[in-house]
Image (cartoon, rainbow, N blue to C red):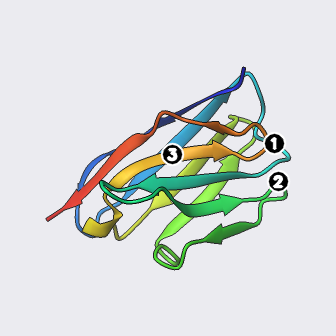
Amino acid sequence: QVQLVESGGGWVQTWGSLRLSCTASGGFFSGHAQGWYRQAPGKQRELVASITGGGRADYADSVKGRFTIFRDNDKNTLYLQMHNLLPQDTAVYYCHSYLWGTWGQGTQVTVSS
């Protein structure tokens, strides 16, 4: 069974940066789509960014221009580079494979002043 493991979360000050990583075991990211989602306390899980098998990215309006999703097929790792973080970005971030229907365990991102 394919497993996804996120890392890279933590605490950062407002306007800071973080890079999240998601590695897959038991399968390969290459050639199919993945997404990054987040869930803040008391809110529904929402799509933050997605990337197609061909590498085309799409973003939620709230993160456009600040976040970048990309994939390193050689490392079999999905990334979410986050800049200019705001307190409203505080959430647990999850990676997801649309092909396998698999979720990672999540990584906490906390942004505060």
Residue at the spot 46% in from the left edge and 55% down from the top edge: 38
> Tag on residue 53?
2
- The quadrant holding residue 25 is top right
Give the vertical position of 20 relative to 102 (above or below).
Answer: below
Marks 1 & 2, CB-CB < 8 Å contact: yes
- Rendering coords of residue 27 (x, y %): 77, 28
Give the vertical position of 25 relative to 31 (above or below).
Answer: above
Which of the two labelled residues, at mark 1 and mark 2, occupies the earlier sequence position?
A: 1
- Rendering coords of residue 99 (x, y %): 79, 42
The residue tagged 1 is 30
- Rendering coords of residue 13 (x, y %): 21, 61
Classify residue 15 as left or right of residue 81. Answer: left
Label 1 residue SS: loop
Question: Dot 3: few (<14), some (14–19), or many (≥20) neighbours within 10 Å?
Answer: many
Using the rendered image of the protein, determine whether residue 85 is visible from the camera's viewpoint.
yes
Which of the two labelled residues, at mark 2 and mark 3, occupies the earlier sequence position?
A: 2
Classify residue 20 as left or right of residue 76. Answer: left
Could you tell me the amino acid type at mark 2? Gly
Question: Dot 2: few (<14), some (14–19), or many (≥20) neighbours within 10 Å?
Answer: few
Label 3 residue SS: strand
Using the rendered image of the protein, determine whether residue 86 is visible from the camera's viewpoint.
no
- Rendering coords of residue 89 (x, y %): 35, 64
